[in-house]
Amino acid sequence: MIRADNLSFAAGGVPIIRDVSFALDPDGPTLILGPNGAGKSVLLRLLHGLLEPDAGQVRAPGPQAMVFQRPVLLRRSVLANVLFPLRGPDARARAEQALALVGLQAMAHRPARRLSGGEQQRLALARAAAQRPAILFLDEPCAALDPAATRAVEEIIRHLAAAGTRIVMTSHDLGQARRLAGEVLFLHQGRLLEHTPATEFFAAPRSPEAAAFLRGELLWAPGA
Ligand SMILES: Nc1ncnc2c1ncn2[C@@H]1O[C@H](COP(=O)(O)OP(=O)(O)O)[C@@H](O)[C@H]1O
Ligand SMILES: [Mg+2]
């Protein structure tokens, strides 16, 4: 069970996350939605423990991994990138299995940084999946990808979710959110305005802000 209790975070005196509380549905996937600057990335970083809250607490038990909009890859082979965080005698088998999952087994010995953007993001997912996280945080994983590469990444996310990995992700792509989400957290100016099953959120958002967001009329919201 992933939960946040009265979470607050400010930077330079500016509140960015404001008294946010939730207990996520055990199944998910959870999509964190909201306009640019709403605080989605900061919330994800708080949940993953990359940022310390100023107040409140996070409970997200179990091993975790995170994938970012732009993958951070070592200047080494594809396989070496997946092996890097792994320990133990089965590391190689796990790495190869993860590369097969994302369709990169044939590229195992290529330099990682020469892959296309879509392949690099699949590699980042393989590296995360090989660690067998209970929770996988994804921050705009397809923001830099074309539609075909986006669909390939979505297939992998769906596969991991079906295999029991708890997915918590942000996306600015509403089509993607509809395709993947089990539940939606809607953030606006650092406040959690909605936490609803995805079907309800897209059919009948409760807040005027979410309705405007779904109509494409709420594109940017400053944190202050
Ligand atoms: N480390 C930081 N220091 C100061 N301001 C930050 C920091 N990180 C994010 N912000 C600000 O917090 C707000 C929310 O940022 P972010 O979570 O990246 O938004 P989103 O992911 O929803 O687009 C923005 O106004 C951003 O400029
Ligand atoms: Mg963001």
Image: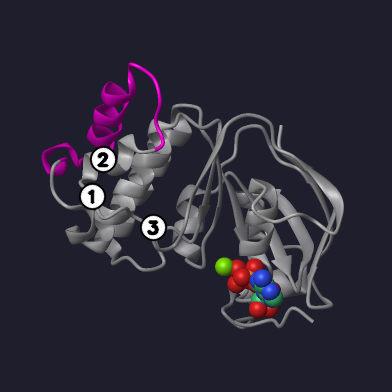
Q: Position of residue 90 (x, y in %)?
A: 33, 18
The secondary element bearing badge 2 is classed as helix
The secondary element bearing badge 1 is classed as loop
Picture colour scheme: one colour
Disc 3 CB within 8 Å of nearest ligand 2 atom: no
Residue that mark 3 sits on: 72
Q: Which mark is residue 61?
A: none
Q: Is residue 5 visible in the rendered structure shown here?
A: no
Q: Position of residue 191 (x, y in %)?
A: 80, 66
Q: Is residue 93 above or below residue 35?
A: above
Amino acid type, callout 1: Arg
The secondary element bearing badge 3 is classed as loop
| Residue at the image position 26 percent from the left and 55 percent from the top | 75
Residue that mark 1 sits on: 76
Q: Quadrant of residue 220?
A: bottom right
Q: Magenta stretch: give its range.
A: 85-108
Q: Tag 1: Cα neighbours inside 10 Å, few (<14), some, or many (≥20)?
A: some
Residue that mark 2 sits on: 80
| Residue at the image position 20 percent from the left and 46 percent from the top | 77
Q: Quadrant of ligand 2?
A: bottom right
Q: Is residue 128 above or below residue 55?
A: above
Tell me whether circle 2 and circle 1 mark residues in contact (CB < 8 Å): yes
Disc 2 to disc 1, C-alpha distance = 6 Å
Tell me whether circle 1 and circle 3 mark residues in contact (CB < 8 Å): no
Q: Tag 3: Cα neighbours inside 10 Å, few (<14), some, or many (≥20)?
A: few
Count of residue discs = 3
Q: Is residue 205 visible in the rendered structure shown here?
A: yes
